[in-house]
Image (spheres, rainbow, N blue to C red):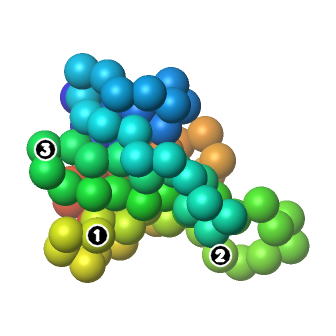
Amino acid sequence: MHIGEKIETIIYSRKDGQFGQYLGSTAVTFGACCIDGIIYKVERNIEVDNDKPFWTVRNINHGTVATETDKDYLGCIREEHFH
């Protein structure tokens, strides 16, 4: 299972699950979760006429970021996408 699938499952179920812990959301953060001791914050771009990626996933522990432009592909993000 990819890290994106784990993140997506936790964020959309809005509860602790077998993959990690849901940490809530804020005005800026679509959702945050902790997986294997690593905190991920997910931001969603809802501006239609904006050149920013639709999804931005931040690995808070390592300071790395992964992005995805397609709104349906949060679950496809893998560890190697973080930079």
Structural distance between the alpha carbons of marks 3 and 2: 29 Å
Q: Residue at x 77, y 60 (%)?
A: 46
Within the image, what quadrant is residue 9 found in? top left
Which mark is first along the chain, 2 or 3?
A: 3
Q: Is residue 66 left or right of residue 68?
A: left
Viewer-proximal residue among 79 and 10 = 10
Q: Which dot marks residue 36?
A: 3
Q: Position of residue 71 (x, y in %)?
A: 64, 47
User: Amino acid under label 2?
Assistant: Lys
State left or right for residue 70 relative to residue 56: right
In the rendered image, which residue does mark 1 sit on?
Answer: 60
Whether label 1 touches label 2, CB < 8 Å: no
Under circle 1, the secondary element is: loop
Which element carries disc 2, helix, strand or loop? loop
Residue at the far left: name it: 36
Looking at the rendered image, the quarter that the C terminus falls into is: bottom left
Question: Residue 14, relative to residue 71: is it above or below?
Answer: above
Residue 71 located left or right of residue 11: right
Residue 69 visible in the picture: no
Q: Can you identify the residue that label 2 sits on?
A: 52
Q: Amino acid at mark 3?
A: Asp
Q: Residue at x 19, y 55 (%)?
A: 38
Number of other residues with Cα within 10 Å of mark 3, as a class: few under 14, some 14 to 19, many 20 or more: few
Tell me the kind of residue under disc 1: Ile
